[in-house]
Image: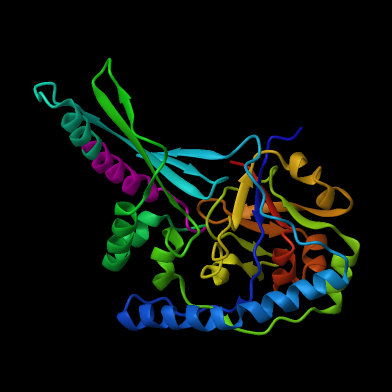
Amino acid sequence: MRNTITISLSIIITLTGCGTATTTTDAANSTRVLTAVSESIVSESVETTESVLAELNLPVMEPQGTFSGSVEESVPGGEIDWSGNTVRATGTGVLDIGNPNMAQARLMAERAAVVVAQRNLLEAIQGIRVDSETRVENFMTDYDVIYTRVEGIVRNARQVGPARYDSVTGTVEVELEMEIHSSQGLSGALSSVLGNPEISAVSMSSQTREFLDQYSALVFDGSQAGLQPSMYPKIYDSNGNLLLDTRNYAEYLGSGGQTAMQFISDLDQILSLPAFAQSPLVLEVRQVTGQFGTDIVLGEAGSSTLGWLKEGLPFLMGAGRFLLNVLL
């Protein structure tokens, strides 16, 4: 069985295009307006996509749960859970043994642990790869508004389970986590510098229809090329032309209340599912590019096959059948 990592994008995408990065108040307002407009058309877009999939007898995949071999990357301050779309950190507080009120002492220690966990979570977030050239720390250094937004999200990070009290050491430990792809998570905080996609209608080309008729999934296998996980990987053809930039879909990855990108370490497990097992198209990644090795370069055969990828992507995502296989 191969020890690999897979990204599964399983949401319906209705937008495409790339906007201009900015950090002004106008940009923030534009983002809110864009989101409001997109919500007004999303039901129509979902209906259109699902009707096409139904016509092709291609059922929409439900959001997948946690698979064995989850992908967790240790970074200073905590861990990036690429499988669970979260980043986590813990903090420890020490009980004041001189306080006669033990309930109060534990509460104060728990509050101290939360503060430490928030500090660690902020540090861990900075290690997340946004794309092939940038980590979150770059945005937080260059843009005060991003630093402020991330700080705000960290302060409101959810606690994972109850605080853990160790009577032997007299300490309290708290674990916090926040989502990577979510309007209330990291991608939402970065939205003003990622650019705003343009709204466009989706229509199925004959190439897309033929693909969905013939194959159960589209898989990019980058395990031999050493592809690394990131928030927004790019896909290039053999001549260096950009086929797909997932950053263009930043506003909508995770907007459906489910994991937009799911990384797992066992591709065979995904392909053994009934919806994928029949006839997936698996394309080998020729090489990776970018400073962090997160972008895909396809060979000639794969490039010629995927000339329709941009227009077909909404339907592949809508069916939960767009997979990127990477190696951590």
The picture quadrant where one finds residue 159 is top left
Residue 237 visible? The answer is: no
Q: Which residues are magenta?
A: 112-131
Give how far across and how far down residue 242 sits, in percent: 64, 70
Horizontal and vertical percent position of residue 43: 64, 78
> Above or below — where is 185 with respect to 36?
above
Q: Is 127 in the magenta?
A: yes
Quarter of the image for residue 151 reads bottom left
Q: Nearer the viewer, residue 130 or 92?
A: 92
Q: How is this picture coloured?
A: rainbow
Q: Residue at x 77, y 40 (%)?
A: 268
Which residue is drawn at the image coordinates 66% and 54% (left, top)? 63
SS assignment for the magenta stretch, majority? helix
Count of picture labels: 0
Task: Note whether residue 254 is visible.
Answer: yes
The N terminus: image quadrant: top right
Task: Name the spot of residue 109 as percent of width and height, x first.
Answer: 21, 33
Nearer to the camera, 80 or 177: 177
Q: Residue at x 45, y 62 (%)?
A: 187
Is residue 263 covered in magenta?
no
**Which quadrant of the rendered structure holds the C terminus?**
top right
Q: Percent from the top left, x then y, of residue 160? A: 42, 40
Please, which residue is most extreme toward the top here?
A: 168
> For this view, does 116 lie left or right of residue 271?
left
Q: Which sits in the foreground, 35 or 206?
A: 35
Which residue is at a point 37% across and 45% down the rendered structure image? Answer: 124
Q: Is residue 299 left or right of residue 17?
A: right
In this rendering, would 178 be left or right of 96? right
- Where is 198 relative to 207, above or below? below
